[in-house]
Image: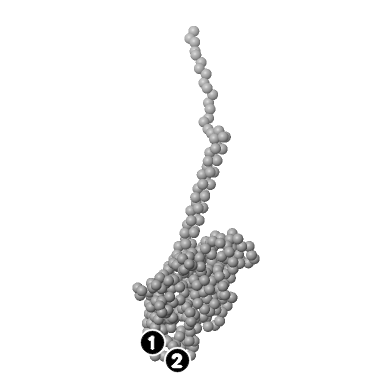
Amino acid sequence: MRRRTIIAKAPFRLAGFTLIEIMVAVAVLVILIVFVAQLTNSATAITRVGTKHMDADTQARTVLDRLGFDIGRMIRRTDLDYYIKGPGSYTGHGNGHGWGKKLTGGQQGSDQCAFFASVPGYYPQSSGQGSISLIAYRINQNSTTSTAPYLQMERMAKGLLWNGVSNLTNQNAVYPIVFLPNTISGIPSWSAAVNDDNSGQSIDADYEVVGSQVFRFEYWYLLKSGILTDVPWDQAATPAHTWLNGWTDVQAIGVAIAVVDPGARALIPSTTLLDIASDLDDFKTAPGRGIGGQKKVGDIEYRWNTVLFGDPADLANTPGILNRGTTTAGSRVPREVMKSIRIYVRYFDLREQ
């Protein structure tokens, strides 16, 4: 009889993962998802900040290029008037402007200037109109006018007639360029070029907004002697100079502006933005960092950034800045919103003009 050998087969088993393996895989997947999400959020934040900075950079470049173009074509003569900052009759530092940190009662504002330049204006062309315009720059602070572009940078360009073409004296007259002893402030229809308060003299339809994000404007002078000052002539000369004399002592005009991106501006009440603007030092009273406290290039930029992002005491007049150490009542500005404010400084060389 033939014998048969029976071989027992092992029972069939299905291949798969154990519960522990699945839990480890899920944990690793969660870690990867969290890591990727963090990278995405960081990239989004960086992109958002970069976009805000590009917006501010574009606005600042446009404003400074326009201002530089006008300064480059400014008419520099000894027989013309200029509305600029300086001692005596040069009162562009007055009218409640330019002192910073509220060092004088009620002051909350920026510098202002007006001068004649060889650029086109906005009056309709006529047979007697020349190529000269009255140019003026300011930060609009006429807060009582509902249509005013409050705390925005404005530029005026009034096209003028040649001197002698018109001798009208009414307020709506198209005036010619004026020579000393006549002054810019002496022409009634030019009152807004030298005023920026809540009066009717500050309103002029010839102003246009050139910097909707610019809320602070400051300028000063670099003399040919190397001195930085708010006086546009060399007081240290021998003998000391005492007047503008056609800008002969000035090598360059320094300009600083503060720009806030549109999204952040919507989060800052106008009263708080005005307080922030007034906390930014004026050139005259800002501490110098040179030997013996002498002013040097970069001081204003350093001081303004210190006020915005440094010692909380530098924002003593601002109602409240979150995470800056102040807890007073009123509108409070998050630190991240403050980061949306950027400072720009440029020098315009007069020697090349």
Tell me which residue sits at (43%, 83%) in the image: 81
Mark identifier at residue 77: none
Q: Which residue is mark 2?
A: 168
Towards the viewer: 142 or 47? 142
Q: Position of residue 339 (x, y in %)?
A: 52, 61
Towards the viewer: 45 or 25? 45
* Looking at the image, residue 222 lies above or below residue 29: below
Q: Secondary structure at mark 2?
A: loop
Q: Position of residue 29 (x, y in %)?
A: 52, 42
Whether residue 157 is visible here, answered yes or no, is no
Residue sticking out furthest to the right: 329
Amino acid carrying label 1: it is Trp
State which quadrant residue 274 falls in: bottom right
Tell me which residue sits at (53%, 30%) in the image: 14
Q: Position of residue 227 (x, y in %)?
A: 42, 71
Q: Secondary structure at mark 1?
A: loop
Q: Position of residue 344 (x, y in %)?
A: 46, 66
Q: How many marks?
A: 2
User: Is disc 2 surrounded by few (<14), some (14 to 19) or many (20+) residues within 10 Å?
Assistant: few
Residue sticking out furthest to the top: 1
Towards the viewer: 161 or 181? 181
Tell me which residue sits at (49%, 71%) in the image: 283
Whichever of labels 1 and 2 marks the residue nearer the N terminus, that label is: 1
Whether residue 141 is visible here, answered yes or no, is yes
Q: Which residue is mark 1?
A: 162
> Is the C terminus in the top left, top right, bottom left or bottom right quadrant?
bottom left
